[in-house]
Image (tube, grey):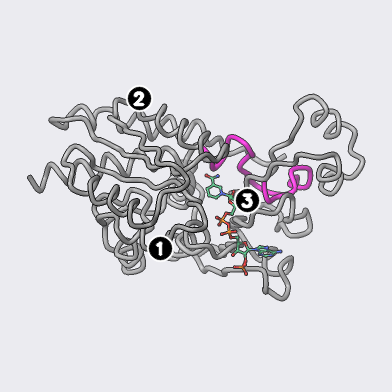
Amino acid sequence: MPRLLDGKLVRDQILSELKPRIAALHSRPGLAVVLVGANPASEIYVRNKVKTCEDIGLFSEKITPPATITTDELLNVIADLNARPEIDGILVQMPLPTHIDSRRVLLAIAPHKDVDGFHPYNVGNLVSGNPGPRACTPAGIMEMLRRCEIPVAGKNAVVVGRSDIVGKPMALMLLHQHATVTICHSKTADLPGECRRADILVAAIGKAGLIRGNFIKPGATVIDVGMNRLNTPAEVGAVFGDNAAKRAEFEKKGSLLVGDVHPLEVDQAGAVTPVPGGVGPLTIAMLMANTVAAAEAHTARS
Ligand code: NDP
């Protein structure tokens, strides 16, 4: 059986290391979270972020404009947060309602307060290897690899998915740590073959169980970023066939959370991240780390 890479354990390590850094600052680091409209999934994510702030002693402020807010009005909200000295980090929870120009909103966040690491200025810093906030999910994965002593240099890393928030920054971070990196996407000709070359396989696709057992090289480290909720018996059947245990679990819980890697086909892997409890907890931990680093930089400037 593969080694289970416990994201909660790594999260707890990261958070406990932040506490003395927070205590050393003359004021509490502040994170503003902007949640536009009512989106149940986003509300859960935001609640978890705010709760983690409280747990480790960060000041947090939740701003909840209605879904009818215009792009210009939202830009004013961001301008106000940019100007407030007690706010070190600004996070705009995505996705935004479709009538809002998300790109303009992300561009409006002051780069030194961009704790998501999505601003082009910070993406440029990542590309060039300059310091600055990094996208939280891939940064958390790098922390996990380091802390679990999984070597990266010289290894073949395959990243499936090329989004701006996970796949691309993930590939760059692995490259900076001297992996030989391949990026796959929906037009990749031979996905199983590419994946089978991976010593480190990162799946960031958003398709339940797409990565099957025959995609995985024996002994590979498999990082599953996907978070896919199966809500109907048909969806459960599409991934698990007539597996009685999974059907019973679905009946009991009403839905199943499944990664992009088929959870019943990882036996030959060397190590895997579970879903839930793998990558998810790391993302929030790195958001906290970025906020503390922004506050430290703020203190150093003032
Ligand atoms: P996006 O939808 O932005 O990107 C998905 C990527 O997967 C695209 O590059 C797409 O290719 C590729 N893809 C889609 N279908 C296939 C296929 N059949 N074969 C190969 N590649 C394919 O998703 P995100 O990057 O935002 O998120 C990916 C997953 O990670 C989601 O499940 C999301 O919920 C989860 N997530 C989890 C986080 C966590 O903290 N655990 C944080 C962020 C995301 P193309 O570019 O060609 O369309």
The Cα atoms of the two marked residues, 1 and 3, are separated by: 32 Å
Q: Amino acid at mark 1?
A: Arg
Q: Does mark 2 have its CB less than 8 Å from ligand 1?
A: no
Q: Main secondary structure of the magenta part?
A: loop
**Disc nearer the start of the sequence (2/3):** 2
Q: Is residue 201 above or below residue 300?
A: below
Q: Residue at x 22, y 46 (%)?
A: 80
Q: Which residues are magenta?
A: 259-280
**Disc nearer the start of the sequence (1/2):** 2
Measured as percent of width and height from the top left, residue 205 is found at 63, 57
Q: Which residue has dot 1 on it?
A: 103
Foreground: disc 2 or disc 3: 2
Left or right of 21, for residue 179 = right
Q: Amino acid at mark 2?
A: Glu
State the SS at label 1: helix
Q: Which residue has dot 3 on it?
A: 222
Task: Place residue 118 in its image quadrant.
Answer: bottom left
**Disc nearer the start of the sequence (1/3):** 1
The reply to whether callout 1 and callout 3 are in contact (CB within 8 Å) is no
Q: Amino acid at mark 3?
A: Val
Residue 36 magenta-highlighted: no
Measured as percent of width and height from the top left, residue 184 is found at 62, 68
Q: Is residue 199 above or below residue 266?
A: below
Q: Is residue 41 above or below residue 188?
A: above
Q: Which residue has dot 2 on it?
A: 54
The Cα atoms of the two marked residues, 1 and 2, are separated by: 30 Å
Foreground: disc 1 or disc 2: 1
The Cα atoms of the two marked residues, 2 and 3, are separated by: 32 Å
State the SS at label 2: helix
